Image: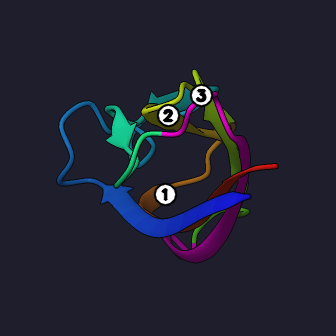
Amino acid sequence: MQIQAGTVSYGYGTSGWTLNIGSGARSFTTPDITFPTAFSTPPTMIVALYGVDAGNSANLRLTVATADIEASEFNVVFNTWADSVIYTVWVSWIAFTP
């Protein structure tokens, strides 16, 4: 079994981040996140939100998921909608293969 873990954060200072402006459905996909050591096959992934900086004038609406998982890299996708304002998010991840 091979296991790797890490943390990432993205927000209003990140190029392409729009979760803090506008309204309606908005999404941000991270640039490729590279594993410290490539796996032999795409791993199973777990992501968990461990921090959020959000505006307090609307409900907090946020989803977090992985995307494009490959043996050497993956992406995280953040989604919000309606009038939620998301300034920054922090995520931890675990990748493993049997």
Q: Nearer the viewer, residue 56 or 3?
A: 3
What range is drawn magenta here?
A: 39-56
Does residue 13 belong to the magenta stretch?
no
Q: Earlier in the sequence, mark 1 or mark 3?
A: 3
Residue denoted by label 3: 69
Q: Is residue 98 above or below residue 51?
A: above
Q: Are marks 2 and 3 in contact (CB under 8 Å)?
A: yes
Residue flagged by tag 3: what amino acid is it? Ile
Identified at 55% across, 63% down, the residue is 4
Marks 1 and 2, how far apart at CA: 22 Å
Residue flagged by tag 1: what amino acid is it? Ile
Marks 1 and 3, how far apart at CA: 25 Å
Identified at 34% across, 42% down, the residue is 34
Marks 2 and 3, how far apart at CA: 4 Å
Q: Earlier in the sequence, mark 1 or mark 2?
A: 2
Identified at 65% across, 38% down, the residue is 66
* Neighbours of disc 2 within 10 Å: few (<14), some (14-19), many (20+): many
Residue denoted by label 2: 74
Q: Nearer the viewer, residue 94 or 76?
A: 94
Q: Is residue 71 above or below residue 2?
A: above
Task: Indicate the position of residue 78 as horizontal and vertical percent values.
Answer: 57, 42
Circle 3 SS class: loop
Residue 86: image tag: 1
Residue flagged by tag 2: what amino acid is it? Phe
